[in-house]
Amino acid sequence: MDIDVFSWWSFLRTIAAINIVAWMLSAVLLKRRQTSIDANAYALRKMQLLLSAGYVFGCAFRSFVPVFDVPRLCLFDSWLSSVIVGRSVATLAELCFAAQWALLLHETSRATKSSIGRITAMSVVPMIAIAEVFSWYSVLSTSNIGHVVEETLWGACAALLVISLFEIWPRFPLRLRPLLLLWGTAGIAYVFFMFMVDVPMYWSRWMADEALGRQYMSLAQGLVDVSSRWQVSHRWEDWQSEMAWMSLYFSVAVWFSIALIHAPNPARSPAKVWRHSLRRQVNFRSPA
């Protein structure tokens, strides 16, 4: 194996192991906090934990068994390296990640009475589900035009999230605005990356294939192909175009997924908690 490819793969495996430990610690921490937060907040955090598990462990699998879908490249001669396995894991993981953001935005929008946020929260998972359909189209047919649409939908979804955060900003608790600023900054960076780097990359690949008159597979042919054919490659030249996005995707994106488990509830600001506690004390002391 090329030393550079091996170093990259070692990096992915190390990050994956760290991420799994971080998720497990998050599960323990959430369990300990159960008695200190109300039942609804705990239920939402538990749902975030379960959805994060789908993303964290899905990305860990893909870190240990990297696959370059369209050319059917992998590092190991095993059915686990088949595209149909890797793409299925990726689909489930990405839907879990999208659901995490939808759940958080729905919770935040309800607390801040944001209509734009609520509409966006309801749109996130359907948009990503459609993106997954186009991803499968590209994987099966080997035509990168599906990836162009897929990545455009991911970028558009992130842009809607950023717009929602801007709309929520004036009604967000002051103490939590630095967190909102972090989410917004990360979202803007992601949108720029998608539309300035990722989408143009897939577009250029599709244009190059069109210029060469490449013949694409039918969906039926592609399904047989992704289930039965995988090509082992350890060459830097074959993997270098995938290294940047995989490295960021399996590290930074996973850290966001884990962080969402612990995202504070904007409806439970200190003043509201104090007033709620005071009302409980008054009601307790009032005569029957």
Image (tube, grey):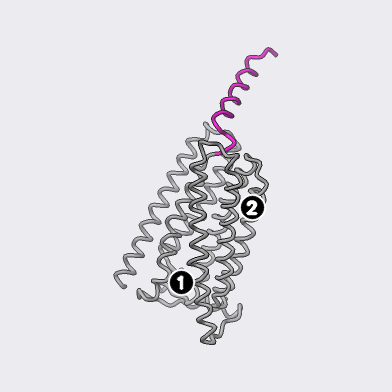
> Disc 2 marks which amino acid?
Thr
Mark nearer the N terminus (1 vs 2) = 1
Residue of label 2: 120
Give residue 140's position: percent from left, percent from top. 56, 75
Q: Is residue 271 magenta?
A: yes
The outermost residue toward the right is 288
- Amino acid type, label 1: Phe
Magenta-highlighted residues: 265-288
Residue 16 drawn above or below residue 201: above
Dot 2 crowding, Cα within 10 Å, few <14, some 14–19, many 20+: many
Q: Which residue is mark 1?
A: 68
Whether the magenta-drawn stretch holds residue 110 is answered as: no
**Residue 106: x percent and y percent?**
62, 46
Indicate the secondary structure of the residue bearing disc 2: helix
The image quarter containing residue 168 is top right
Q: Secondary structure at mark 1?
A: strand
Q: In this orientation, which residue lies closer to the viewer: 73 or 171?
A: 171
| Residue occupying the point 61% across, 37% down | 40
> Residue at position x 51%, y 71% from top?
200
By secondary structure, the bulk of the magenta-drawn segment is best described as helix
Alpha carbon of mark 1 to alpha carbon of mark 2: how far?
31 Å
Q: Position of residue 220 (x, y in %)?
A: 61, 79
